[in-house]
Amino acid sequence: MSGHSTYQPQSAFMKWMERRLPIAGLMYSSFVAYPTPRNLNYWWTFGGVLTFLLGAQIVTGIILVMHYTPHADMAFNSVEHIMRDVNYGWLLRYLHSNGASMFFVAVYIHMARGMYYGSYKEPREVLWILGVILYLLMMATGFLGYTLPWGQMSFWGATVITNFFSAIPLVGESVVTWLWGGYSVGNPTLQRFFSLHYLLPFVIVGVVVLHVWALHVVGQNNPTGVEPKTDKDTVAFTPYATIKDGFFMACFCIVYAWFVFYVPNYLGHADNYIPANPAVTPQHIVPEWYYLPFYAILRAIPDKLMGVIALFGSIGILAFLPWLDTSRVRSANYRPLFRQFFWIFILVTVGLGWLGSKPAEGGYTIAARILTIYYFAHFIIILPILGWVEKTKPLPNSISEAILKSSGVSSAAPTATKS
Amino acid sequence: MTASSVEPNRRDFLYIATGTVAAVGGAAALVPLIAQMNPDASTIAAGAPVEVDLGPIAEGQVIKVFWRGQPIFISHRTKKEIEEARKVSLASLPDPQADDKRVKPGKDQWLVLVGICTHLGCIPLAHQGAYEGWFCPCHGSVYDTSGRIRQGPAPKNLPLPPYKFLSDSKIRIGEEDTAKV
């Protein structure tokens, strides 16, 4: 593998600096010379999109805090103040609220890509687990942020989610009172949620650094799942990956902007424009769309404690994926059976999401139970067995061989061209 | 060197003593850091008992008052509602409790409940659901006219707040009876 510490400082100042803090060299070897598999497709650009969105959320969030008041009596009105009075306040708030949704769109595609191409397999287990931790932190941050406007959905969403902890035997009620800082969700709850909502994005930044570090130790996976063997298999991160990530990011931003400018409330709930009222529960409580599959799992189980365990289990099981998938072949391109089960799993998860948005009654509950069983069976039964029984297709000897075969080019053209 | 590494010396003592102080100090520092999140003095003070005049509540009516930020249901039950609550066989209930254990002696018509669904904390709607008691719109838990869970994901009956009768038409919520009425 090429590209390590090839940085040559040019100016006298950079030479002086490099001997004291070699940050330019680190950046150069990480994001310029870093060898990236030459066959990466657009599904690999979502890491860049996520980094961009994290930055955008932090910038818009810090600005919103300049105008927001974290108090139960004033929070709702201060959000309306942002929407009506603050210069471009409507834009900044819509960028932030839709940015959260775009963040989850991107992370779900990023995770699905990892699952399809087996990116969690040896030696990338820690990289994957750091990703699961990031996903959990994102969910916590999104939930905390959704309570801040202090509308009806904010209040009742916070009540329902914090009540998950009341399912803990013996100490459950005390834990919930401790979380609330009172006997119900109230001003102390709002203030601590605000504090934590401001903190967690920076924790996410820290874990992203670890995630990228781990990525740069083991290298990127690629659509063949075969590790790069020679220089022919890789291209330099800059310009190849940089321009591809940048181009796609711009395309992604068109979708983001479409939501912000044309349907800014499409992914929200009208109920959240009603100020929080502890006396009235909305007729139909629904979480944000990105939690819906897990909400469906919670409601599918008729026992409170088991429902909460299943909800957390459905996310926690992702951390064990590297060991539940027993196949040695990474990419679904060479696993004909797994590829079908992967798409069934995606459909089941989307189906659970749809059921999560429906009332918990009759046929919806029965369907949610069937899909919940399948969701867990995918991890606990199907993946381990597939590894034993599946007849995989022959793997290419190298990335460059796979590319040349598919593009029909006879002679190698290393690093200069890219499909 | 070999001899001193076997015999504990002053450095070993300092090492263990410093480590112990750090561990105990760290644990002690956690107490205020965690305890600050529990309800503060003003929240506790705002949770003082409240008195409710039952006079204006008509038979068949359910009113909602607030105590400690929690909705409290006060139901003036009809004869039919009391009968329905009493004729159920306890064995068929998910959280068996006799109706007369859920009201004060001689006050069968007054049912006082914490109006928070024991599933995930939503507020159930009165006079709804299959048993015409309460129905939770969030996840479909159904309570009967005694506030007992009958169907759905909630594990327990609607809890009873501490309260006592000051007179036949007045209760104080937040204070338990010391003597039997």
Image (spheres, rainbow, N blue to C red):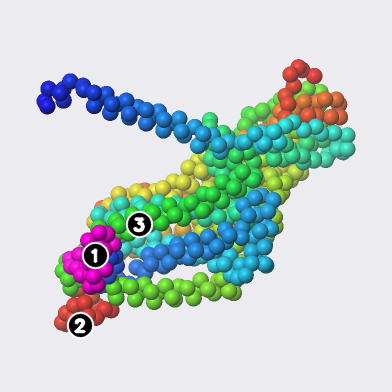
Which chain does tag 2 point to?
A: A
Which residue is denoted by mark 3 in the rendering? A209
The disc at residue A409 is: 2
The disc at residue A16 is: 1
Most common secondary structure along the magenta stretch: loop
- Residue drawn at point x = 41 percent, y = 33 percent: B26
Could you classify mark 1 by the number of other residues whose Cα lies within 10 Å: few (under 14), some (14-19), or many (20 or more)? few
Q: How far apart are marks 3 and 2 (CA)?
A: 39 Å
Tag nearer the camera, 3 or 1 = 1
Q: Position of residue A388 (x, y in %)?
A: 26, 53
Which chain does tag 3 point to?
A: A
Could you classify mark 2 by the number of other residues whose Cα lies within 10 Å: few (under 14), some (14-19), or many (20 or more)? few
Quadrant for residue B105, please give it: top right
Amino acid found under the numbered disc labelled 3: Val
Amino acid found under the numbered disc labelled 2: Val
Q: Which element carries disc 1, helix, strand or loop?
A: helix
For marks 3 and 1 on the same chain, the one whose residue lies earlier in the sequence: 1
What range is drawn magenta here?
Answer: A1-23
Amino acid found under the numbered disc labelled 1: Trp
Residue A69 higher or lower than B51, as above or below: below
